Image: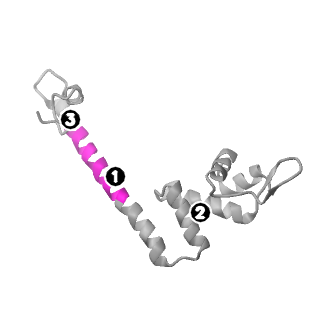
Amino acid sequence: MWIQQAAEAAGVNPQTLRYYERRGLVRPVGRQASGYREYTDEQVRVVRFVKRAQELGFTLDEASELLKLRRAKASRKSVRAVAELRLADLELRIADLVRMRDALRALTIECIHGLDPACPILEALEGHARPDGRS
């Protein structure tokens, strides 16, 4: 199949498929005399695999590593190690997001109910108050 057909079958646009190709994640099986790239069902499966990995928070480099493990029929332990690293990173990011949410929530509450005429949000952004709303 050609790039447009392969992209549609994989649920991506052709630019994504070309990008994955440049990154070495997928390669066309060949080119026609006209220059059109040709892809097989296996390349479509690879693109879907990468997209699903990204949906779970894996980077393209990690997806590439998972593909190599898949091709090598690696042990579950090897695959789990990659997933555990991603999970640990996601947990840290979630903790940061919760901290930011709580700080912004405190600032917006202070903005509504505060007696000080200065805006606590602007003050915090200028460095006059801590992001958690306290001076």
Label 3 crowd bin: few (<14), some (14–19), many (20+), radius 10 Å = many
Q: Residue at x 70, y 52 (%)?
A: 7
- Image coordinates of residue 74 in percent, x first then y, are 54, 76
Residue 49: image tag: 2
Q: Quadrant of residue 125?
A: top left
Residue shown at 67% from the left, 44% from the top: 15
Q: Which residues are magenta?
A: 89-107
Residue 106 belongs to magenta span: yes
Toward the bottom, the furthest residue is 75
Q: Position of residue 2 (x, y in %)?
A: 79, 53
Q: Could you say where residue 46 lies in the image, as x and y percent from the top left? A: 64, 62
**On the rendered structure, is 16 left or right of 90?**
right
At label 1, the amino acid type is Arg
Q: Name the amino acid, label 2.
A: Phe
Image vertical order of residue 122 relative to residue 94, above or below? above
Report which residue position mark 1 lands on: 93
Label of residue 38 in the image? none
Q: Is residue 1 left or right of residue 55?
A: right
Among numbered discs 3 and 1, the one appearing first in the sequence? 1
Q: Which residue bears the numbered disc 3?
A: 107
| In this rendering, the label closer to the viewer, 3 or 1 | 1
- Between the C-alphas of marks 3 and 1, the distance is 21 Å
Circle 1 crowding by C-alpha within 10 Å: few under 14, some 14–19, many from 20: few
Looking at marks 1 and 2 on the same chain, the residue that comes earlier in the sequence is marked by 2
In-front residue for pair 129/71: 71
Q: Give percent across and percent down for residue 90.
A: 37, 57
Q: CA distance from mark 2 to mark 3?
A: 42 Å
Q: Are marks 3 and 1 in contact (CB under 8 Å)?
A: no
Looking at the rendered structure, the kind of residue marked 3 is: Leu
In the image, is residue 121 above or below residue 31?
above
**Residue displayed at 23% across by 44% down:** 102
**Count of labels shown?**
3
